[in-house]
Amino acid sequence: MSGIRFESVANVDDIEPGSGLRCIVGGRAIALFNVDGRFHAIDDRCSHDDASLAEGWLEGCEIECPLHQGRFDVTSGKATAAPCVVDVSTYPIRIEDGRISVAVPI
Ligand code: FES
């Protein structure tokens, strides 16, 4: 049987607006971002090479990869700047009582 499972990963206060946090959910590395108080979760591995997107620079809703400065829209996972051409996955988020949960496929 397949589906999704939410896992609690962080407090909303753990991630300042304009910043990101790497977390592991279901054995998968996820990058969580706070864009003006709204949270978004994408793969924490750049689709171009082996870099953590959570360690990049968030500008608006775009994350710039720390390795070769490719970019992704954290709200959609879309690759928006070269050398990145392959989109990354996004993951559903739930917020309850100040805790952020992220869902991954099981
Ligand atoms: Fe991200 Fe190259 S590893 S742009």
Image (cartoon, rainbow, N blue to C red):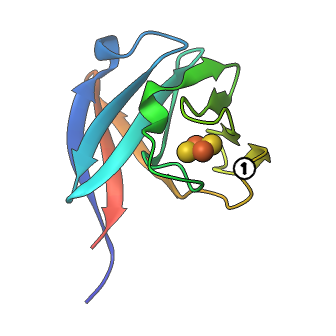
Residue 13, picture quadrant:
top left
- For this orientation, the residue located farthest to the right is 81
Residue at 27% across, 38% down = 23
Percent coordinates x, y for residue 46 in the rendering: 53, 48
Asked if 32 appears above or below 83 in the picture, the reply is above
Asked if 12 appears above or below 54 in the picture, the reply is above
Within the displayed image, which quadrant is ligand 1 positioned in?
top right
Residue at 74% across, 48% down = 83
Asked if 97 appears above or below 91 in the picture, the reply is above
User: Is residue 60 shown left or right of residue 25?
Assistant: right
User: Is residue 71 shown left or right of residue 43?
Assistant: right
Residue at 33% across, 19% down = 12
Percent coordinates x, y for residue 39 in the rendering: 49, 30
68 or 80: nearer the viewer: 68
Circle 1: element type:
strand
Q: Residues within 10 Å of mark 1 (few under 14, many from 20)?
A: many
Tag 1 residue: 79
Residue 16, picture quadrant:
top left
